[in-house]
């Protein structure tokens, strides 16, 4: 659990670093995607409890003590939603990038800063 | 008291002082002439001048304000004089001093100046407003030490009432403001130099640049009116100074002697010094005399 | 009643179905689209009505058949209903505004819009944290996509920045939610309590809170938002700025209960800082939409701060404050964004196209005044109560920051406003097309703004209807604006007199006295305005507003009523000044100083203890012991209005640039409002004198104002500026006399106030007449007009004698009283300065009468006529007044004596016509007779003995050896006192003007350097956000 948590944070930071340093719009979107993935891993990892089983009420789980025997299903549920949303956002971002490129033939973020002050 | 008797007294008082003032003017002209190395006109020359100008064949007017200007001027002189109690204890010479105190007199001095300035203004001659602008500016400057001195006196005697101020100086020569409040007297006497417009403060008339100053367009009877006023007004100012600083007068001869001597101060200074430029004159008044005035207030109020 | 969940489901369903529906034509799909939006408003409106007025209990909607926390639940209480009603209404109106766009665009635009509405509604109602995340993403994604309705480079790049920033924020949100779940095992807000958290757990709350907070655009992590505001289409941006912000603000409100106090404090302060800096930076902004962006960001910061700082207050008060800010800001902002879309001008300077478009200008004005927090709009009440609350909580730093920020906001908003009305930029005057679909929502919102003001005034405060009169006057006159201006003028005169009659049974003489100045003085001055030709649209409304506000000051009972009237007075006079031809800068200066003064007063009144009696304020204040700080602040406020030295620079500009028949009101009457206020402070002060003698210093300021004003007046070339500085000087005397705090002092102050009202009105009206005939105010371009305008000349002559204090006119009474009171008090040096000032006043008095009326008549004025009768009448009424009190000083001295005796023992004895003080005496009546005598005798003499006199022509003068060439070269007028300026040397420099100029320069430079933060680079913005999170993290001390 700790390992995946650290991995998640690591990805998050790498992603952020990428977003901050890469000039290419596509790479920034990739950076965002990595941040997103990192977040998802973090979510999943906090729901994971070592030595416990999947949250399915079948024969391996004692109904009376179910809550103590299974891992928490909610983070997993959450992460599914989050992944879908992340996907949508990433897709939208990319479509923005395409539109921007179509209009101005440039993918460098430095070319899009006339709005300022 | 019957108002007609009061008016009669006032007329007498005005006549006496006008004659005195005009004579004084003649004497001063003689003195200046002698200083300049001339023989000079007779002492009665001011009277002759008035009669002469009044008798001029041609008389012109530029409009109604021009017409009223000299009247304002003379009314200012008359009023100023009439609000001053001239001789302490005298009924004839107490004038209309019941109408107001020192402040009234100080502000009535402006009545004639303002009116004259307006009349001269309508004349349309550029020298008039030029002289007036200088005169008004100088007036604002010399009023400062004078008003400071007045304030010092008001503190000293705790009143603006001229009669009371004179009464407080009776008894001994040492009771005169001159000795009880010397700083105020110094400040006031310096501003008197400005008021009398003798050199070094003669910028208003400035014979070389703007001959005779504001009255330049005035002629015949108008000029005569102004000349009459000159005698009366000078005397009125001197009487005011006498009352404020030199113990007032209990009879006519004392009044004449004192005012004559006060005037001689102006004359001596005037005969000895060259003329200031306008800004020099203003700066002068706003510096040392003002400081002396402030010092007199501080001295009298806090020590 | 319809289950509120249908708001979500209907919109969602319609969103999916629209693609199909659109196949059978855009008309149908638009019908469905607007139908759904209207239905939403209707459903939520009904709920709002039930929850608020029928006390229906809060609705909890459980989903999936379980109750919380096992399932997600939605909640619709009064607060939710309020926010949603507002959000849905705005969404509907925005959609109406976007009608044209929606008709043409791809159907996906409509769908996205509906989805966005789902997001907003869900976000407000849900109680589940993760659900909140989902709804906020729905909201964000649809918003991002809506931005592409206009595909310009700017909007796309702004959208991209918005997306990255939003993405980062939602990452924090998600992490926060996850960890909260980890620490509490719960996602439902109703089941999460502060107590559930360990120290580490606070980090999770922090992440959640900061994510929401970032969405609220705190300074400086808000560059992306500014870009969006600037670049995106007005219709969409009003949705983003208003609907989205409202929803996110409500989310913040919802999570507040689980935030620890130290977080809240930090956020509150961060909100205040945001408010301050965004308004500061707004100063430099020239782009209309970006300007609104800065204002938006600031207002949201203020909203957050107000929410956090008012949590502990009683509900109704908190609703007024937070609700007031919320409504006021969002409605005004939506309306203004819409207007930017109608006007379609980016640069503020190009907005003068509005000049010719009255309906739009009115809407613009209403919304702008509302946004700036002027009465009667909601923001004003909210600000008043908020400041009061903060002051009671001793949060002075916050108060100062907020008020300074507000001042900046007023400055940039009204710069915009004044530029729109008076800007002189040459632009092609293409008429703005007023599309119904765009005007309709704007009008509705302006209407709602007014409606809310009415509701607050009526139901929250329950004001006497008199206090609404100023606004009613504007509305009524607007209705009859088609009438010619003469009829409106006569009606106004009647209205003023009626008003005077209405308030006449006054409680005390002091009110009566100021009533005469305010009401009777104004009534006489109205006669001067009857000279107007044409319709003078809007003029009389504003004039009446101002006059009624004067009157209301007298009958105000509470601090708030007083302050309300004060603000009405400021607004109306500002707008009146703005009517002047070149009054843009002048009115701005006036407004800036007035507003600053008003803010100081606001704090001052907040510091003041509660009033105990039900009398009018001017009486009950005597039982109130004002703290020193309150005395100082109030005094400064009032002294700004009366143009005291240091804060006087607005005065000459405003007096000079106002229309010439408005100037008498501004100068002769408006300044007296400051005098009235200062007297009010004094009344409290004399009964409860603190150890530190404030009025001693006020006295010095007054005295210095008198002398500096007199000098400045003497150096003017412009007649109205000269008179303006003269007013400054005269009011300096009044202020100084009030500061004496003695019977004689107050007697002088009131005597001079009355006198000044008369002579300054008459002088300004006389100059108005001269200006009307010669079309110039520059004095040296005139001259010799005595021949052409004798009546005006006589009036000016009498009035300048009255100003100068030369006996026998009433001015001398003022001088006599003032010097006596100063010497009596022991203020000797001050008296000396006043003597000096009074001497200097001769300079400007002579200058104005000489250069205009005397000297040489110019060729171009050969055919000038006497001023119109409407200008002459009021002047001669005032002359009669002056003459009456000069001749019979008792007429005025006696009543004033009794007024002042209410506060001090009388120090004068009135015996017949002789008035004696402890120092001297003065018999005005006798002086008059003597003067008449000494004047008439020489006059008769001259008339008798100077019969041969002949009149001569203009150039017939004794001119040595040359002849006068032209009036221009002969008239001594220009720079008349050059020698005095020379004599003053370094003392003549305009230091105070320079000082304020520097202040302005510095704040603008500061604004400019701070806003360099917003580099326009998306990556910088991300960096800002991350840094901001880190900084706030350390400050909160998690």
Image (tube, coloured by chain):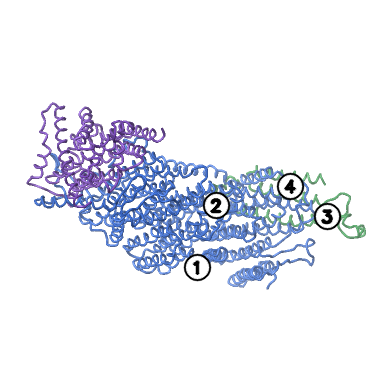
Chain colours: A green, B purple, C blue
Circle 3: element type: loop
Check the image and report above or below for C186 versus C961.
below
Categorize mark 4 by other alpha carbons within 10 Å: few (<14), some (14-19), many (20+). some
Q: Are marks 4 and 2 in contact (CB under 8 Å)?
A: no
Which mark is nearer the camera, 4 or 1? 4
Give the distance between the C-alpha atoms of the residues marked 1 and 2, in whole angstroms.
Answer: 49 Å
Q: Which badge, 4 or 1, is on the more N-terminal residue? A: 4
Q: Which badge, 4 or 2, is on the more N-terminal residue? A: 4
Q: Which badge, 1 or 2, is on the more N-terminal residue? A: 1
Q: Are marks 3 and 4 in contact (CB under 8 Å)?
A: no
Q: Can you identify the residue that label 1 sits on?
A: C436
Image mark 3: chain: A
Measured as percent of width and height from the top left, residue C406 is found at 53, 51
In the rendered image, is residue C385 in sight? yes
Circle 1: element type: helix
Whether discs 3 and 4 lie on one chain: the answer is no
Give the distance between the C-alpha atoms of the residues marked 4 and 2, in whole angstroms.
Answer: 42 Å
Give the distance between the C-alpha atoms of the residues marked 3 and 4, in whole angstroms.
Answer: 21 Å
Q: Which labelled disc corresponds to residue C608?
A: 2
Q: Which one is nearer the viewer's eye here, C929 or B42?
A: C929
Circle 4: element type: helix
Measured as percent of width and height from the top left, residue A83 is found at 74, 55
In the rendered image, is residue C367 in sight? no
Check the image and report above or below for C528 versus C586.
below
Q: Quadrant of residue C73?
A: bottom right
Give the distance between the C-alpha atoms of the residues marked 3 and 1, in whole angstroms.
Answer: 57 Å
Q: Which labelled disc corresponds to residue A72?
A: 3
């Amino acid at each position: 659990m700790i390992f995946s948590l650290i991995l998640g944070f690591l990805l998050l930071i790498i992603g952020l670093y990428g977003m901050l340093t890469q000039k290419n719009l596509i790479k920034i979107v990739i950076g965002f995607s990595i941040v997103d993935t990192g977040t998802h891993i973090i979510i999943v990892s906090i729901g994971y409890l070592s030595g416990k089983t999947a949250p399915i009420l079948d024969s391996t789980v004692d109904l009376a003590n179910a809550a103590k025997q299974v891992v928490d299903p909610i983070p997993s549920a959450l992460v599914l939603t989050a992944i879908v949303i992340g996907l949508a956002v990433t897709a939208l971002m990319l479509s923005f990038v395409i539109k921007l490129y179509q209009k101005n033939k440039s993918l460098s973020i430095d070319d899009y800063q006339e709005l300022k002050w | 008291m019957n108002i007609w008797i009061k008016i009669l007294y006032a007329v007498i008082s005005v006549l006496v002082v006008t004659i005195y003032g005009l004579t004084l003017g003649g004497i001063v002209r003689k003195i200046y002439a002698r200083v300049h190395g001339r023989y000079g006109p007779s002492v009665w020359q001011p009277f002759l001048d008035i009669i002469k100008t009044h008798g001029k064949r041609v008389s012109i007017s530029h409009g109604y304000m021009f017409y009223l200007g000299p009247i304002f001027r003379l009314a200012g002189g008359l009023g100023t004089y009439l609000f001053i109690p001239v001789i302490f204890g005298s009924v004839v010479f107490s004038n209309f001093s019941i109408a107001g105190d020192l402040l009234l007199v100080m502000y009535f001095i402006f009545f004639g100046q303002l009116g004259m300035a307006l009349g001269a203004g309508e004349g349309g001659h550029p020298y008039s407003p030029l002289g007036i602008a200088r005169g008004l500016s100088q007036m604002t400057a010399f009023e400062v030490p004078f008003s400071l001195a007045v304030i010092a006196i008001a503190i000293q005697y705790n009143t603006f009432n001229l009669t009371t101020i004179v009464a407080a100086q009776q008894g001994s020569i040492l009771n005169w403001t001159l000795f009880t409040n010397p700083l105020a007297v110094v400040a006031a006497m310096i501003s008197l130099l400005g008021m009398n417009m003798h050199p070094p403060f003669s910028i208003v008339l400035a014979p070389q640049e703007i001959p005779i100053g504001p009255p330049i367009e005035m002629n015949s009877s108008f000029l005569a009116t102004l000349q009459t006023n000159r005698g009366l007004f000078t005397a009125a100012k001197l009487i005011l100074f006498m009352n404020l600083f030199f113990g007032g007068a209990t009879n006519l001869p004392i009044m004449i002697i004192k005012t004559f001597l006060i005037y001689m101060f102006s004359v001596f200074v005037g005969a000895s010094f060259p003329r200031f430029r306008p800004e020099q004159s203003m700066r002068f008044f706003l510096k040392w005399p003002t400081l002396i005035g402030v010092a007199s207030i501080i001295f009298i109020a806090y020590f | 009643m319809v289950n509120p969940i249908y708001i979500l489901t209907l919109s969602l369903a319609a969103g999916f179905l629209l693609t199909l529906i659109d196949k059978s034509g855009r008309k149908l799909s638009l019908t469905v689209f607007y139908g759904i939006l209207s239905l939403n408003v209707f459903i939520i409106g009904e709920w709002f009505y039930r929850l608020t007025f029928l006390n229906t209990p809060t609705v909890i909607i459980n989903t999936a058949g379980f109750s919380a926390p096992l399932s997600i639940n939605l909640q619709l209480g009064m607060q939710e209903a309020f926010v949603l009603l507002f959000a849905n209404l705005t969404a509907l109106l925005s959609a109406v505004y976007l009608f044209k766009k929606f008709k043409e665009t791809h159907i996906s635009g409509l769908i996205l819009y509906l989805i966005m509405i789902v997001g907003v509604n869900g976000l407000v109602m849900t109680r589940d944290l993760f659900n909140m995340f989902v709804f906020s993403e729905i909201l964000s994604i649809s918003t991002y996509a809506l931005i592409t309705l206009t595909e310009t480079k700017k909007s796309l790049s702004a959208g991209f920045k918005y997306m990255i920033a939003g993405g980062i924020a939602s990452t924090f949100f998600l992490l926060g939610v996850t960890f909260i779940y980890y620490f509490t095992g719960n996602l439902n807000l109703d089941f999460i309590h502060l107590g559930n958290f360990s120290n580490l757990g606070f980090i999770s709350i922090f992440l959640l809170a900061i994510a929401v907070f970032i969405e609220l655009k705190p300074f400086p992590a808000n560059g992306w938002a500014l870009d969006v505001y600037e670049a995106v289409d007005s219709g969409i941006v009003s949705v983003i700025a208003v609907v989205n912000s409202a929803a996110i603000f409500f989310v913040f409100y919802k999570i507040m209960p689980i935030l620890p106090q130290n977080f809240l404090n930090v956020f509150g302060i961060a909100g205040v800082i945001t408010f301050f800096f965004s308004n500061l930076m707004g100063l430099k902004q020239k782009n209309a939409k970006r300007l609104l962006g800065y204002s938006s960001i600031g207002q949201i910061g203020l909203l957050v701060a107000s929410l956090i700082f008012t949590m502990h207050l009683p509900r109704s008060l908190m609703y007024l404050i937070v609700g007031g800010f919320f409504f006021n800001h969002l409605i005004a902002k939506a309306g203004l964004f819409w207007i930017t879309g109608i006007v379609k001008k980016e640069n503020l300077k190009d907005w003068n196209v509005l000049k010719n478009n009255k309906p739009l200008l009115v809407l613009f004005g209403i919304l702008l005044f509302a946004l700036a927090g002027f009465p009667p709009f909601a923001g004003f009440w909210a600000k008043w109560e908020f400041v009061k609350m903060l002051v009671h909580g001793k949060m002075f730093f916050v108060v100062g920051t907020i008020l300074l920020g507000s001042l900046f906001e007023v400055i940039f908003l009204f710069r915009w406003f004044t530029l729109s009305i008076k800007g002189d930029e040459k632009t092609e005057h293409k008429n703005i097309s007023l599309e119904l679909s765009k005007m309709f929502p704007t009008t509705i919102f302006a209407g709602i703004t007014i409606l809310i003001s009415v509701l607050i005034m009526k139901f929250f405060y329950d004001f006497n209807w008199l206090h609404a009169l100023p606004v009613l006057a504007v509305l009524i006159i607007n209705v009859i604006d088609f009438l010619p201006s003469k009829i409106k003028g006569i009606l106004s005169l009647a209205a003023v007199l009626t008003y005077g009659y209405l308030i006449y049974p006054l409680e005390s003489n002091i009110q009566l006295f100021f009533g005469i100045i305010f009401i009777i003085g104004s009534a006489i001055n109205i006669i001067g305005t009857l000279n107007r030709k044409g319709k003078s649209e809007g003029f009389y409304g504003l004039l009446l507003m101002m006059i009624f506000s004067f009157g209301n000051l007298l009958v105000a009972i509470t601090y708030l009523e007083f302050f309300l009237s004060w603000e009405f007075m400021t607004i109306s006079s500002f707008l009146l000044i703005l009517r002047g031809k070149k009054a843009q800068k002048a009115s701005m200066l006036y407004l800036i100083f007035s507003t600053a003064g008003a803010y100081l007063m606001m704090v001052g009144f907040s510091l003041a203890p509660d009033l105990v009696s039900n009398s009018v304020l001017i009486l009950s204040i005597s039982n109130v012991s004002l703290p020193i700080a309150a005395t100082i602040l109030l005094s400064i406020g009032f002294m700004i209005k009366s143009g005291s030295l240091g804060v006087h620079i607005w005065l000459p500009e405003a007096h000079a640039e106002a229309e010439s028949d408005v100037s008498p009101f501004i100068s002769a009457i408006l300044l007296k409002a400051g005098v009235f206020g200062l007297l009010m402070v004094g009344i409290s002060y004399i009964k409860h004198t603190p150890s530190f003698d404030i009025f001693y210093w006020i006295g010095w300021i007054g005295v210095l104002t008198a002398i500096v004003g007199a000098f400045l007046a003497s150096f003017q070339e412009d007649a109205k500026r000269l008179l303006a500085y003269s007013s400054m000087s005269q009011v300096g005397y009044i202020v100084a006399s009030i500061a004496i705090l003695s019977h004689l002092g107050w007697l002088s102050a009131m005597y001079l106030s009355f006198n000044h009202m008369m002579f300054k009105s008459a002088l300004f009206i006389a100059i108005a007449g001269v200006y009307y005939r010669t079309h110039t105010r520059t004095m040296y371009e005139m001259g010799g007009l005595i021949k052409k305008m004798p009546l005006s000349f006589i009036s000016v002559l009498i009035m300048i004698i009255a100003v100068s204090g030369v006996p026998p006119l009433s001015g001398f009474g003022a001088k006599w009283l003032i010097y006596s009171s100063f010497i009596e008090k022991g203020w000797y040096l001050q008296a000396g300065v006043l003597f000096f000032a009074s001497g200097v006043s001769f300079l400007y008095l002579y200058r104005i009468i000489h250069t205009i009326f005397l000297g040489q008549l110019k060729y171009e004025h050969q055919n000038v006529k006497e001023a119109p009768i409407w200008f002459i009448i009021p002047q001669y009424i005032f002359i009669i007044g002056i003459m009456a009190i000069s001749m019979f000083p008792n007429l005025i001295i006696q009543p004033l004596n009794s007024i002042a005796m209410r506060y001090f023992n009388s120090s004068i004895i009135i015996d017949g016509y002789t008035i004696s003080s402890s120092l001297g005496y003065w018999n005005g009546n006798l002086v008059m007779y003597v003067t008449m005598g000494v004047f008439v005798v020489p006059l008769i003499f001259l008339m008798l003995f100077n019969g041969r006199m002949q009149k001569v022509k203009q150039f017939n003068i004794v001119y040595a050896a040359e002849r006068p060439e032209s009036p221009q070269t002969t008239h001594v007028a220009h720079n008349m006192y050059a020698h005095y300026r020379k004599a003053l040397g370094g003392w003549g420099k305009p230091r105070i003007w320079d000082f304020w100029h520097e202040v302005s320069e510095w704040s603008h430079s500061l604004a400019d350097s701070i806003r360099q933060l917003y580099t326009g680079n998306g990556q910088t913005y991300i960096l800002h956000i991350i840094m901001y999170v880190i900084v706030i993290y350390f400050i909160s001390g998690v």
